[in-house]
Image (cartoon, rainbow, N blue to C red):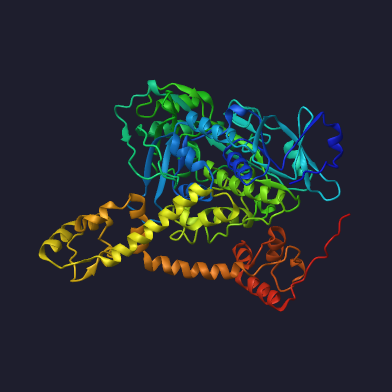
Amino acid sequence: MHTPLPTSSAYNQAIHTEKADVLIVGGGHAGIEAAIASARLGAKTILLTMNLDTIGQMSCNPSIGGPAKSQLVREIDALGGVMGECADATYIQRRMLNTSKGPAVRALRMQSDKALYRDYAKKLIEAEPNLKLRQTTISQLLTNPKTGAIEGVMDGLGVAYLAPALVLTTGTFLNGRIWVGEKSFGGGRPGDPPAKGLTASVMSLGLTTGRLKTGTPPRLDGRTIDYSGLDIQHGDDTSFFSFMPNRPQLDQIPCHITRTTEITHELIRANIHRSPMVQGLMTADCGPRYCPSIEDKVMRFADKDSHHLFVEPEGRSTYEVYLQGFSSCLPFEVQVEMLHSLPGMERAEMLKPACAVEYDYFPAYQLSAGMMVKKVAGLFFAGQINGTSGYEEAAAQGLMAGINAARYAGGQPEFVLPRSSSYIGTLIDDLITKEILEPYRMLTSRSEYRLLLRQDNADLRLTPYGREIGLVKEDRWQAYQQRVSAIATEKARLASVKLPATDEINAVLGNLAEGEQIKEGSTLLQLLRRPKVTYQALSVLNAETALVAGDIADIVETEIKFEGYIERQARENKRAVLSEKLKLPINADYYAIAQLSLEAREKLSRFQPLDLAQANRLSGVNPSDVQVLQVLLSAGKLPLKAVEIVG
């Protein structure tokens, strides 16, 4: 890889220069994945961050996973990313959620020791031979004045960092402003300054920007909480995020549950006029719908008498406690009154008040499916800069942006995961084809293929891709092959073992599976297809079944029991893949197609879908519009814009 000298006039003002193949700006969860992926793919990478001591900082909730998010974490791990490894090494509690529901929505969630998570992530970065760290604040992008392509960045000291590929993972720092009631101050998060100047530099390249809001709950002194009357929430001995073997078994710490009271609600209603959002003091367009402030919950769900709140330790060596569900931007003194109205919190002391953060973002329809800005070659965005929320969403985007930045710098084609393959593909496809008017959060309902795209089979779906692009190394590949072999072996064994229909076996089966009875010569596989028969029941009927590892047993049971549904979704998936093969040219002139509706012309021109499947998912594009495109495409009569030749 070769980094040419930049032609930008700003470069002449540089007091010092450093060269790389890929630059990563930001050390949050997106930046970590982007930097490590880029470096492991052979690109000389520099991670530029405002504070080296806060790499991997959990700015809000100290947890990883949950519904839909656990799928993202396991997919990151399957491709060779590191979030799952960090979570597995630093958890204080792990739980499988939605165990009574179907396999498509079951989700692993880990409460993390936030200090240990941060330290572990930084050690991984420091161990990468192709990766350098620099503490600095970037204020300007360097681009080629003729082609518009990225050439590097400049920091506030006048140091130029040069590379043909740049990934911006700025989180909530772009012109960030923190609000507690009517009081506000600049900041990307409490205790850290905002990033100034970078938004203007990006906008000068012709990109559209917007403003969003997020929030975080107060942190409490755990020694001042009365836990005696609170519901306790223990962890379980469930599986891990990473598919790699030998994961640590750590002692778990319980969490607790409290709830709001009528006094809490009265305080909120009496003071809602003091919210900076209500007063119009904040310039953000919207906050997160799926992670609302407590005042939003109380006002939006006026019929509810109470809302659950989760009391979660922030680590093993701190008394700091996170009060999940109690995010707020009301004034400090109101927050204290609200806190003391909660059971168990009558004497609780606040270490840090709840606050809201508003920040600049760039709508992701301006990106390609490979996370590169359409108008600026070599510029990639990942994380909250794209209008998303959540560590897991950020990490997934960072992984893909890092992979594609390294591939771009090396002259390779972009690597894209279609939505039919993964939650990561669904996430990115949603971002680049939909108008994001509020911080985007991944939900299981967003995937039409969620029974195929479960958390338990992420490695089976994606590890071959990771191997193909070079991110999955030999140790992970061997672990994958062993797992594939173990699953196939167990399925074959269940299909070969037959049970006699004796009175003794029928009596045992009837007790285990609510009266189920066996027919002579039935195999274990046939029994497992029955809704009331579990894998655990088979282990009682046939002792060898108990020898199979728990995670292997889970995937075997799911694939056998839901075989018909899985096959039906697989057929639907195949049809979707066929639509994805009908590519649309990037220079299609949709305004010249009179048969399209006016809204369809506008949406197609703005989002520039890659294929007919993406076009069909755009709001405002009707099935009749897609049929028009398909006819013109098949006949080779789709009108094209004239290509401007630069230079």
Q: Residue at x 47, y 34 (%)?
A: 62
Q: Nearer the viewer, residue 330 or 222?
A: 222
**317, above or below 519, in the image:** above
Screen quadrant of the C terminus: bottom right
Q: Position of residue 82 (x, y in %)?
A: 52, 42
Quarter-of-image position of residue 593: bottom right
Q: Which residue is drawn at 56% across and 67% down?
A: 577
Q: Residue at x 39, y 43 (%)?
A: 304
**404, above or below 307, in the image:** below
Q: Which of 448 and 42 is in front in this view?
A: 42
Q: Where is residue 315 in the image (x, y as percent from the top left)?
A: 43, 28
Q: Position of residue 368 (x, y in %)?
A: 67, 55
Quarter-of-image position of residue 384: top right
Residue furthest to the left in view is 503
Residue furthest to the bottom in view is 635
Residue furthest to the right in view is 647
Total marks shown come to 0
Q: Is residue 569 left or right of residue 563?
A: right
